[in-house]
């Protein structure tokens, strides 16, 4: 009886069913690295610096802080700032 491979391998951005040898290699890699998944590194979208903003009379230290307080997405805050929506202002340090 043979073992059915249930792990998928990424090849050139496409997914394919892993061969038994690939399954064995992946199991060994995970044991060696104490890792449970393949992590694809991505580029950071922001510079890493928080941006102070003034929204409807309150100052927030970052877009994410403002988004959490307003219960909206960061992109919604960012778009409002880019469109110069009334009550949304970027603060320079």
Image (cartoon, rainbow, N blue to C red):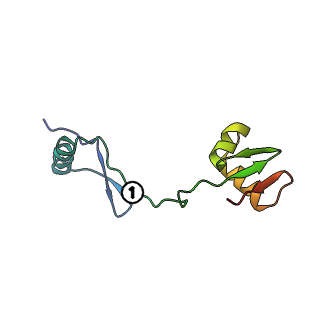
Question: In the visual, does 78 lie left or right of 84?
Answer: left
Outermost residue toward the left in this view: 1
SS for dot 1: loop
Nearer-the-camera pick, 14 or 70: 70
Residue 69 in the image: state x and y as whole percent.
70, 37
Nearer-the-camera pick, 68 or 57: 57
Nearer-the-camera pick, 38 or 72: 72
Quadrant in which the N terminus is drawn:
top left
Identify the residue at image location x=38%, y=61%. Answer: 13
Question: In the visual, does 52 lie left or right of 84?
Answer: left
Residue 91 in the image: state x and y as whole percent.
73, 57
Identify the residue at image location x=74%, y=46%. Answer: 59
Q: In which quadrant of the rendered view does residue 30 lie?
A: top left
Identify the residue at image location x=18%, y=38%. Answer: 3
Residue 68 in the image: state x and y as whole percent.
66, 39
Identify the residue at image location x=21%, y=45%. Answer: 33
Q: Quick check: 88 above or below 83?
A: above
Quadrant in which the C terminus is drawn:
bottom right
Mark 1 sits on what residue?
A: 41
Q: Quick check: 34 above or below 43?
A: above
Nearer-the-camera pick, 43 or 15: 43
Outermost residue toward the bottom in this view: 12
Q: Quick check: 37 above or below 88?
A: above
């Amino acid at each position: 009886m043979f073992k059915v491979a249930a792990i998928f391998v990424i090849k050139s951005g496409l997914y394919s069913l892993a061969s038994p040898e690939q399954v064995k290699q992946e199991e060994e890699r995970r044991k060696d690295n104490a890792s449970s998944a393949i992590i694809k590194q991505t580029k950071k979208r922001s510079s890493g610096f928080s941006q102070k903003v003034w929204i409807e009379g309150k100052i927030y230290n970052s877009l994410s802080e403002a988004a959490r307080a307003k219960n909206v997405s960061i992109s919604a805050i960012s778009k409002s700032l880019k469109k110069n929506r009334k009550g949304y202002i970027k603060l320079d340090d």
